[in-house]
Protein backbone atom coordinates (compact mmCIF):
# COMPACT_ATOMS: atom_id res chain seq x y z
CA UNK A 1 0.00 0.00 0.00
CA UNK A 2 1.48 3.38 -0.95
CA UNK A 3 1.37 6.32 1.48
CA UNK A 4 -1.30 7.90 -0.73
CA UNK A 5 -3.49 4.79 -0.52
CA UNK A 6 -3.05 4.69 3.24
CA UNK A 7 -4.51 8.17 3.59
CA UNK A 8 -7.16 7.78 0.90
CA UNK A 9 -10.10 6.52 3.02
CA UNK A 10 -9.30 8.97 5.82
CA UNK A 11 -9.12 11.84 3.36
CA UNK A 12 -12.52 10.91 1.96
CA UNK A 13 -14.07 10.70 5.45
CA UNK A 14 -12.48 13.98 6.42
CA UNK A 15 -13.53 15.95 3.37
CA UNK A 16 -17.09 14.62 3.63
CA UNK A 17 -17.52 16.25 7.05
CA UNK A 18 -17.94 19.67 8.56
CA UNK A 19 -20.01 22.70 7.62
CA UNK A 20 -18.75 25.64 5.58
CA UNK A 21 -17.14 28.54 7.43
CA UNK A 22 -19.14 31.76 7.41
CA UNK A 23 -17.56 34.49 5.29
CA UNK A 24 -17.38 37.63 7.43
CA UNK A 25 -18.81 40.90 6.04
CA UNK A 26 -16.18 42.93 4.18
CA UNK A 27 -17.05 46.03 6.18
CA UNK A 28 -16.11 44.20 9.36
CA UNK A 29 -12.73 43.27 7.86
CA UNK A 30 -12.11 46.86 6.79
CA UNK A 31 -13.05 48.12 10.25
CA UNK A 32 -10.59 45.71 11.88
CA UNK A 33 -7.89 46.77 9.46
CA UNK A 34 -8.41 50.44 10.32
CA UNK A 35 -8.22 49.57 14.04
CA UNK A 36 -4.99 47.67 13.53
CA UNK A 37 -3.42 50.56 11.64
CA UNK A 38 -4.34 52.99 14.42
CA UNK A 39 -2.87 50.67 17.02
CA UNK A 40 0.31 50.26 15.02
CA UNK A 41 0.63 54.05 14.66
CA UNK A 42 0.20 54.36 18.44
CA UNK A 43 2.91 51.79 19.03
CA UNK A 44 5.29 53.60 16.67
CA UNK A 45 4.72 56.93 18.46
CA UNK A 46 5.12 55.24 21.86
CA UNK A 47 8.24 53.46 20.64
CA UNK A 48 9.72 56.72 19.36
CA UNK A 49 9.13 58.37 22.74
CA UNK A 50 10.65 55.41 24.56
CA UNK A 51 13.67 55.47 22.25
CA UNK A 52 14.19 59.21 22.67
CA UNK A 53 13.85 58.87 26.46
CA UNK A 54 16.30 56.00 26.62
CA UNK A 55 18.88 57.78 24.47
CA UNK A 56 18.60 61.02 26.48
CA UNK A 57 18.82 59.17 29.79
CA UNK A 58 21.73 57.12 28.45
CA UNK A 59 23.60 60.26 27.35
CA UNK A 60 23.02 61.82 30.75
CA UNK A 61 24.28 58.72 32.59
CA UNK A 62 27.41 58.70 30.43
CA UNK A 63 27.98 62.37 31.21
CA UNK A 64 27.76 61.70 34.92
CA UNK A 65 29.57 58.40 34.85
CA UNK A 66 31.81 58.19 31.76
CA UNK A 67 33.27 54.83 32.70
CA UNK A 68 32.91 51.29 31.46
CA UNK A 69 30.20 50.44 34.03
CA UNK A 70 28.34 53.52 32.79
CA UNK A 71 28.53 52.21 29.24
CA UNK A 72 27.44 48.78 30.41
CA UNK A 73 24.46 50.34 32.15
CA UNK A 74 23.35 52.15 29.00
CA UNK A 75 24.15 49.41 26.47
CA UNK A 76 21.54 46.85 27.57
CA UNK A 77 18.88 49.57 27.70
CA UNK A 78 19.69 50.48 24.10
CA UNK A 79 19.65 46.79 23.17
CA UNK A 80 16.23 46.41 24.78
CA UNK A 81 14.93 49.30 22.67
CA UNK A 82 16.41 47.75 19.50
CA UNK A 83 14.82 44.38 20.32
CA UNK A 84 11.45 46.04 20.93
CA UNK A 85 11.65 47.87 17.59
CA UNK A 86 12.59 44.64 15.85
CA UNK A 87 9.62 42.84 17.38
CA UNK A 88 7.28 45.68 16.48
CA UNK A 89 8.37 45.72 12.84
CA UNK A 90 8.47 41.94 12.54
CA UNK A 91 5.03 41.68 14.11
CA UNK A 92 3.79 43.85 11.27
CA UNK A 93 5.45 41.57 8.75
CA UNK A 94 3.91 38.61 10.56
CA UNK A 95 0.42 40.10 10.55
CA UNK A 96 0.62 41.06 6.92
CA UNK A 97 2.22 37.81 5.92
CA UNK A 98 1.68 34.54 5.64
CA UNK A 99 1.46 32.55 2.58
CA UNK A 100 4.77 32.86 0.92
CA UNK A 101 8.55 32.81 0.97
CA UNK A 102 10.65 35.43 2.71
CA UNK A 103 7.94 37.46 4.40
CA UNK A 104 6.30 34.29 5.52
CA UNK A 105 9.60 32.93 6.71
CA UNK A 106 10.21 35.97 8.89
CA UNK A 107 6.59 35.99 10.00
CA UNK A 108 6.67 32.33 10.90
CA UNK A 109 9.98 32.74 12.70
CA UNK A 110 8.62 35.64 14.75
CA UNK A 111 5.41 33.77 15.49
CA UNK A 112 7.54 30.86 16.59
CA UNK A 113 9.60 33.11 18.83
CA UNK A 114 6.41 34.46 20.32
CA UNK A 115 5.04 31.00 20.87
CA UNK A 116 8.10 30.14 22.86
CA UNK A 117 7.58 33.34 24.85
CA UNK A 118 11.18 34.21 24.16
CA UNK A 119 10.31 37.90 23.89
CA UNK A 120 10.11 38.21 27.64
CA UNK A 121 13.03 35.84 27.94
CA UNK A 122 15.25 38.07 25.82
CA UNK A 123 14.32 41.14 27.82
CA UNK A 124 14.78 39.29 31.09
CA UNK A 125 18.11 38.00 29.80
CA UNK A 126 19.36 41.49 28.95
CA UNK A 127 18.26 42.87 32.29
CA UNK A 128 19.85 39.84 33.94
CA UNK A 129 23.13 40.51 32.14
CA UNK A 130 22.99 44.12 33.27
CA UNK A 131 22.37 43.13 36.90
CA UNK A 132 25.05 40.45 36.77
CA UNK A 133 27.60 42.92 35.39
CA UNK A 134 26.92 45.41 38.13
CA UNK A 135 27.13 42.73 40.76
CA UNK A 136 30.58 41.76 39.46
CA UNK A 137 31.61 45.39 39.29
CA UNK A 138 30.36 46.16 42.81
CA UNK A 139 32.14 43.13 44.28
CA UNK A 140 35.32 44.11 42.49
CA UNK A 141 35.07 47.66 43.78
CA UNK A 142 34.62 46.30 47.28
CA UNK A 143 37.64 44.04 46.88
CA UNK A 144 39.65 46.95 45.44
CA UNK A 145 38.93 49.01 48.51
CA UNK A 146 39.71 46.10 50.77
CA UNK A 147 43.03 45.73 48.97
CA UNK A 148 42.37 42.23 47.62
CA UNK A 149 42.29 43.33 43.99
CA UNK A 150 44.64 45.78 42.29
CA UNK A 151 43.12 49.23 41.76
CA UNK A 152 41.89 49.62 38.18
CA UNK A 153 40.99 45.95 37.74
CA UNK A 154 37.29 46.74 38.27
CA UNK A 155 36.51 47.56 34.61
CA UNK A 156 38.27 44.39 33.43
CA UNK A 157 36.21 42.31 35.84
CA UNK A 158 33.08 44.12 34.71
CA UNK A 159 33.83 43.25 31.05
CA UNK A 160 34.41 39.62 32.02
CA UNK A 161 31.14 39.66 33.96
CA UNK A 162 29.30 41.13 30.99
CA UNK A 163 30.63 38.42 28.67
CA UNK A 164 29.89 35.66 31.17
CA UNK A 165 26.39 37.06 31.71
CA UNK A 166 25.71 37.10 27.98
CA UNK A 167 26.84 33.49 27.58
CA UNK A 168 24.77 32.45 30.60
CA UNK A 169 21.64 34.23 29.37
CA UNK A 170 22.04 32.81 25.86
CA UNK A 171 22.47 29.28 27.19
CA UNK A 172 19.42 29.55 29.42
CA UNK A 173 17.30 30.93 26.60
CA UNK A 174 18.23 28.13 24.25
CA UNK A 175 18.29 25.23 26.67
CA UNK A 176 14.62 24.32 26.18
CA UNK A 177 14.72 24.65 22.40
CA UNK A 178 17.82 22.50 22.12
CA UNK A 179 16.29 19.84 24.37
CA UNK A 180 13.10 19.78 22.28
CA UNK A 181 15.03 19.52 19.02
CA UNK A 182 17.09 16.71 20.47
CA UNK A 183 13.92 14.84 21.44
CA UNK A 184 12.53 15.39 17.92
CA UNK A 185 15.71 13.99 16.39
CA UNK A 186 15.56 10.99 18.71
CA UNK A 187 11.94 10.41 17.64
CA UNK A 188 12.86 10.53 13.94
CA UNK A 189 15.79 8.21 14.60
CA UNK A 190 13.50 5.72 16.36
CA UNK A 191 10.98 5.99 13.51
CA UNK A 192 13.62 5.35 10.87
CA UNK A 193 15.10 2.46 12.88
CA UNK A 194 11.68 0.82 13.25
CA UNK A 195 11.05 1.22 9.51
CA UNK A 196 14.37 -0.52 8.79
CA UNK B 1 -10.58 52.00 -4.70
CA UNK B 2 -10.22 49.67 -7.65
CA UNK B 3 -7.55 47.71 -5.81
CA UNK B 4 -9.86 47.48 -2.83
CA UNK B 5 -12.65 46.11 -5.02
CA UNK B 6 -10.28 43.56 -6.58
CA UNK B 7 -9.11 42.55 -3.09
CA UNK B 8 -12.73 42.12 -1.97
CA UNK B 9 -13.54 40.06 -5.05
CA UNK B 10 -10.46 37.83 -4.66
CA UNK B 11 -11.14 37.39 -0.97
CA UNK B 12 -14.73 36.32 -1.45
CA UNK B 13 -13.81 33.94 -4.25
CA UNK B 14 -10.88 32.37 -2.38
CA UNK B 15 -12.55 32.13 1.02
CA UNK B 16 -15.78 30.90 -0.49
CA UNK B 17 -14.03 28.17 -2.47
CA UNK B 18 -12.29 26.79 0.60
CA UNK B 19 -14.82 27.61 3.33
CA UNK B 20 -15.31 23.95 4.21
CA UNK B 21 -11.54 23.32 4.55
CA UNK B 22 -11.23 26.35 6.81
CA UNK B 23 -14.14 25.20 8.95
CA UNK B 24 -12.57 21.74 9.35
CA UNK B 25 -9.18 23.20 10.18
CA UNK B 26 -10.72 25.55 12.76
CA UNK B 27 -12.66 22.63 14.26
CA UNK B 28 -9.45 20.69 14.67
CA UNK B 29 -7.96 23.52 16.71
CA UNK B 30 -10.98 24.50 18.78
CA UNK B 31 -13.78 22.55 20.44
CA UNK B 32 -15.79 25.51 21.68
CA UNK B 33 -18.19 26.69 18.91
CA UNK B 34 -17.96 30.38 19.90
CA UNK B 35 -14.19 30.32 20.07
CA UNK B 36 -14.14 28.39 16.80
CA UNK B 37 -16.16 31.12 15.14
CA UNK B 38 -13.69 33.70 16.47
CA UNK B 39 -10.86 31.65 15.02
CA UNK B 40 -12.57 31.57 11.62
CA UNK B 41 -12.95 35.36 11.78
CA UNK B 42 -9.26 35.71 12.67
CA UNK B 43 -8.31 33.49 9.75
CA UNK B 44 -10.52 35.54 7.44
CA UNK B 45 -8.89 38.76 8.63
CA UNK B 46 -5.38 37.33 8.19
CA UNK B 47 -6.26 36.20 4.66
CA UNK B 48 -7.76 39.60 3.90
CA UNK B 49 -4.58 41.36 4.97
CA UNK B 50 -2.22 38.91 3.28
CA UNK B 51 -4.05 38.77 -0.02
CA UNK B 52 -2.54 41.92 -1.61
CA UNK B 53 0.93 40.43 -1.02
CA UNK B 54 0.16 37.09 -2.65
CA UNK B 55 2.61 36.63 -5.50
CA UNK B 56 1.40 33.31 -6.81
CA UNK B 57 4.55 31.42 -5.78
CA UNK B 58 2.40 28.63 -4.43
CA UNK B 59 -1.18 27.57 -5.09
CA UNK B 60 -3.98 29.66 -3.63
CA UNK B 61 -5.09 26.68 -1.59
CA UNK B 62 -1.62 26.29 -0.04
CA UNK B 63 -1.48 30.03 0.63
CA UNK B 64 -4.88 30.01 2.31
CA UNK B 65 -4.48 26.91 4.44
CA UNK B 66 -1.00 27.91 5.49
CA UNK B 67 -2.37 31.16 6.86
CA UNK B 68 -5.24 29.29 8.47
CA UNK B 69 -2.88 26.80 10.08
CA UNK B 70 -0.60 29.55 11.42
CA UNK B 71 -3.63 31.35 12.84
CA UNK B 72 -4.75 28.10 14.43
CA UNK B 73 -1.41 27.71 16.15
CA UNK B 74 -1.50 31.29 17.40
CA UNK B 75 -5.08 30.80 18.59
CA UNK B 76 -4.13 27.68 20.52
CA UNK B 77 -1.10 29.43 22.01
CA UNK B 78 -3.24 32.35 23.17
CA UNK B 79 -5.86 30.00 24.53
CA UNK B 80 -3.17 28.12 26.44
CA UNK B 81 -1.88 31.35 27.91
CA UNK B 82 -5.35 32.32 29.11
CA UNK B 83 -5.47 28.99 30.97
CA UNK B 84 -9.18 28.66 30.48
CA UNK B 85 -11.25 25.86 31.84
CA UNK B 86 -11.27 22.94 29.42
CA UNK B 87 -13.87 22.45 26.73
CA UNK B 88 -17.19 24.06 27.35
CA UNK B 89 -18.89 21.88 24.73
CA UNK B 90 -17.72 18.55 26.03
CA UNK B 91 -21.27 17.32 25.67
CA UNK B 92 -21.24 18.09 21.96
CA UNK B 93 -18.06 16.13 21.36
CA UNK B 94 -17.74 13.37 23.89
CA UNK B 95 -14.36 11.84 24.52
CA UNK B 96 -14.49 8.36 23.04
CA UNK B 97 -11.66 7.25 25.26
CA UNK B 98 -13.94 7.61 28.28
CA UNK B 99 -17.34 7.25 26.68
CA UNK B 100 -17.16 5.24 23.46
CA UNK B 101 -20.88 4.53 23.45
CA UNK B 102 -21.80 8.19 23.39
CA UNK B 103 -19.66 8.89 20.40
CA UNK B 104 -20.68 5.89 18.36
CA UNK B 105 -24.30 6.93 18.74
CA UNK B 106 -23.84 10.57 17.93
CA UNK B 107 -21.03 10.64 15.49
CA UNK B 108 -20.10 9.62 12.04
CA UNK B 109 -16.64 8.81 10.86
CA UNK B 110 -15.79 12.47 10.40
CA UNK B 111 -16.43 13.18 14.09
CA UNK B 112 -14.26 10.25 15.11
CA UNK B 113 -11.51 11.41 12.81
CA UNK B 114 -11.82 15.00 14.01
CA UNK B 115 -11.44 13.87 17.59
CA UNK B 116 -8.46 11.70 16.69
CA UNK B 117 -6.79 14.61 14.87
CA UNK B 118 -7.30 16.82 17.92
CA UNK B 119 -5.41 14.34 20.05
CA UNK B 120 -2.35 14.36 17.79
CA UNK B 121 0.78 16.12 19.05
CA UNK B 122 1.20 19.63 17.68
CA UNK B 123 4.19 18.68 15.54
CA UNK B 124 2.21 15.97 13.71
CA UNK B 125 -1.18 17.66 13.50
CA UNK B 126 -0.21 20.17 10.80
CA UNK B 127 1.06 17.50 8.42
CA UNK B 128 -1.97 15.27 9.10
CA UNK B 129 -4.45 18.11 8.60
CA UNK B 130 -2.97 19.10 5.27
CA UNK B 131 -2.80 15.47 4.11
CA UNK B 132 -6.45 15.03 5.04
CA UNK B 133 -7.19 18.10 2.91
CA UNK B 134 -5.57 16.14 0.07
CA UNK B 135 -2.31 18.08 -0.08
CA UNK B 136 0.62 16.39 -1.82
CA UNK B 137 3.84 15.69 0.06
CA UNK B 138 5.54 18.64 -1.61
CA UNK B 139 2.66 20.98 -0.76
CA UNK B 140 2.78 19.86 2.88
CA UNK B 141 6.54 20.40 3.02
CA UNK B 142 6.16 23.86 1.44
CA UNK B 143 3.29 24.87 3.67
CA UNK B 144 5.03 23.82 6.89
CA UNK B 145 8.50 24.98 5.82
CA UNK B 146 10.05 21.54 6.32
CA UNK B 147 11.79 19.06 4.02
CA UNK B 148 9.84 16.36 2.21
CA UNK B 149 11.68 13.74 4.26
CA UNK B 150 10.59 15.38 7.49
CA UNK B 151 7.03 15.59 6.14
CA UNK B 152 7.14 11.86 5.31
CA UNK B 153 8.25 10.99 8.83
CA UNK B 154 5.58 13.19 10.39
CA UNK B 155 2.88 11.73 8.18
CA UNK B 156 3.99 8.22 8.98
CA UNK B 157 3.89 8.90 12.73
CA UNK B 158 0.57 10.73 12.45
CA UNK B 159 -0.96 7.89 10.44
CA UNK B 160 0.18 5.32 13.00
CA UNK B 161 -1.33 7.34 15.86
CA UNK B 162 -4.58 7.91 13.99
CA UNK B 163 -4.83 4.23 13.17
CA UNK B 164 -4.25 3.37 16.80
CA UNK B 165 -6.85 5.82 18.12
CA UNK B 166 -9.48 5.10 15.48
CA UNK B 167 -8.99 1.36 15.84
CA UNK B 168 -9.42 1.55 19.61
CA UNK B 169 -12.59 3.63 19.34
CA UNK B 170 -14.14 1.57 16.57
CA UNK B 171 -13.47 -1.63 18.53
CA UNK B 172 -14.99 -0.09 21.66
Image: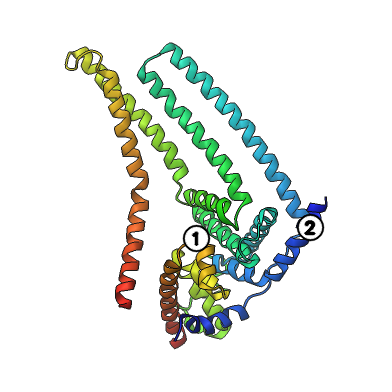
Estimate the x, y position of residue A160 in percent, counting from the top left. 28, 28
Please state which of residues B62 and A141 is positioned toward the viewer in this rendering.
B62
Residue B52, by quadrant, is bottom right
Whether labels 1 and 2 belong to a single chain: the reply is yes
Please, what secondary structure does the residue beneath circle 1 have? loop
Apparent side of residue B59 relative to residue B139 in the rendered image (left or right): right
Picture layout, residue A2 above or below residue B89: below
**Mark pair 1, 2: CA separation:** 29 Å
Say the numbered circle drawn on residue B6: 2
Please state which of residues B22 and A6 is positioned toward the viewer in this rendering.
A6
Picture layout, residue B31 above or below residue A39: below
Apparent side of residue A52 relative to residue A189 in the rendered image (left or right): right
**Can you say which quadrant of the picture contains the C terminus of chain A?**
bottom left
Q: What residue is shown at x 59% (from left), y 32% (from top)?
A: A47
Residue on which disc 1 sits:
B145
- Residue B121 in view (yes/no): no
Estimate the x, y position of residue B166 in percent, counting from the top left. 46, 81
Estimate the x, y position of residue B21 in percent, counting from the top left. 63, 71
Asked whether the beta carbons under mark 1 and mark 2 sit within 8 Å of each other, the answer is no
Q: Chain of mark 2?
A: B
Estimate the x, y position of residue B74 in percent, counting from the top left. 54, 55
Say the numbered circle drawn on residue B128: none
- Residue B163 in view (yes/no): yes
Residue B114, by quadrant, is bottom right
Please state which of residues A171 and B3 is positioned toward the viewer in this rendering.
B3
Q: Chain of mark 1?
A: B
Amino acid sequence: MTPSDEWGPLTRDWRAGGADATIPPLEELRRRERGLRSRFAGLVVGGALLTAGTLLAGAQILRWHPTLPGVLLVLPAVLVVIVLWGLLLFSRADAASAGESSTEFIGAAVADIRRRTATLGILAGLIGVQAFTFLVWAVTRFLERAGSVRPGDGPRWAVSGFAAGLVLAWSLLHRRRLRRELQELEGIHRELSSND
Amino acid sequence: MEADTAQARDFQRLFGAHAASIARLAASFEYDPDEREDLVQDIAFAVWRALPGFRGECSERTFLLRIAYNRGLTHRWRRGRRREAPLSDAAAVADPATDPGALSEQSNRYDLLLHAVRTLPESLRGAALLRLEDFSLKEIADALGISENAATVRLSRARALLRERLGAWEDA
